[in-house]
Image: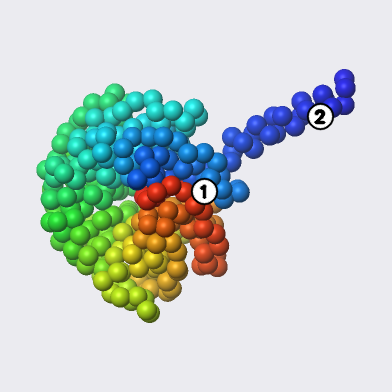
Amino acid sequence: MHRTLLASLFTAPLLLASQVQAATAYVSNEKDDSISVIDLDSLEVTATLPVGQRPRGLALSHDRSLLYICASDSDTVQVMDLATRQIIKNLPSGADPEQFALHPNDKWLYISNEDDALVTVVDTQNSQVLGQIDVGVEPEGMAVSPDGKWAVNTSETTNMLHWIDTATQQLVDNTLVDQRPRHVEFSDDGKRLWASAEIGGTVTVIDVASRQPLKVLTFKIKGVHPDKVQPVGVKLSPDGKYAFVALGPANHVAVVDAQSYEVLDYLLVGKRVWHLEFTPDHKQLLTTNGISGDVSVIDVASLKVVKSIKVGRYPWGVVVTP
């Protein structure tokens, strides 16, 4: 057999395997109605995918084969097959979906409907609405506990966390927090819930067993007016060491000791930082920066910002696949 042909037979599968295994980030661009695709080896945008109007929240199926997209102004949740990067169906999300969370059963999607003060529960497999749950005014943040027992929603105007029992799909409790809660994040062990309050300028750590606050974190950045310190996204490192908090128009990410709750550092990123996500190896953290239209890359070991990646207009949500 010809040497060149023989070599190609061996190298082609290797190239294909490397392409399939390349880690990828997907970023929703709120004002471009698109998703930016970032290769996490090169840290470059490799594609821009058209989607519905005003995409914000993003989530992945548990096998990472499907991307769920809150197309807020299209009043739907779109489902993208990541193998083909095509929208394969639209889910009945309720009006103005903003954020959502997928239950550990990989079927139930809990969706906040900002304009209707509702949480809509959809079965992603048969596209059926399982229920709509009345919550506070302007619901946004959404999280499901690791054990699947709780779905928690934040209402921006009511200033509460709403606890939904997933066994009954009923609201069973409320926790008052600071003004305009935007995001909630469970710890990996499910014992703590971190809730950001944008106008309050705080993050409240909740004991899940009692559903009561344990600690309220405040932030102070030298040279930044307190009114600009507006916490939104929160991401907890899997080793339990750090909590990273996106501080909105303060243009910084706070680094918090997740055990002592001490604020360790502030990292300067792009303008109006919204949300965050780790790369698959957890060595880097990506931030979406709405006004500057870019993604900052933070090296977790050194706690340094190492790169800025230009994406579309008003990047909002971000997820990663291995």
Q: Please tell me which of labels 1 and 2 falls first in the chain.
A: 2
x, y percentage for residue 232? Answer: 31, 59
Instruction: Give the class, few, some or many, for how many residues have Cα within 10 Å of label 2's Cα (few <14, many ≥20).
Output: few
Q: Residue at x 40, y 67 (%)?
A: 252
Determine if residue 61 is in view: no
Position of 61 relative to 302 (above/below): above
The residue positioned farthest toward the top in the image shown: 1
What residue lies at 26% left-to-right and 48% top-to-bottom?
A: 142
Describe the colour scheme in one phrase. rainbow
Label drawn at residue 320: none
User: How far across and down, in percent of the image, does residue 171 sit?
Assistant: 13, 45
Position of 2 compared to 184: left or right?
A: right
User: What is the number of the mark on residue 280?
Assistant: 1
Work out whether residue 34 can be spotted: yes
Q: Quadrant of residue 11?
A: top right
Mark 1 Cα-neighbour bin, 10 Å: few <14, some 14–19, many ≥20? some
Instruction: Give the residue type that dot 2 points to.
Output: Ala
Closer to the camera in the image, 301 or 249: 249
Which residue bears the numbered disc 2?
A: 7
Q: Is residue 60 left or right of residue 216?
A: right
Task: Check the picture and name the quadrant holding the N terminus.
Answer: top right
Q: Nearer the viewer, mark 1 or mark 2?
A: 2
Q: Report x, y in % for residue 19.
A: 61, 36
Secondary structure beneath disc 2? Answer: helix
Residue at image location 45% in from the left, 54% down from the top: 294
Q: Quadrant of residue 233?
A: bottom left
Q: At 27% from the left edge and 26% from the top edge, which residue is drawn?
A: 127
Is residue 80 positioned above or below 298 on the image?
Answer: above
Three-letter code for the amino acid on which mark 1 is drawn: Pro
- 107 to the left or right of 167: right
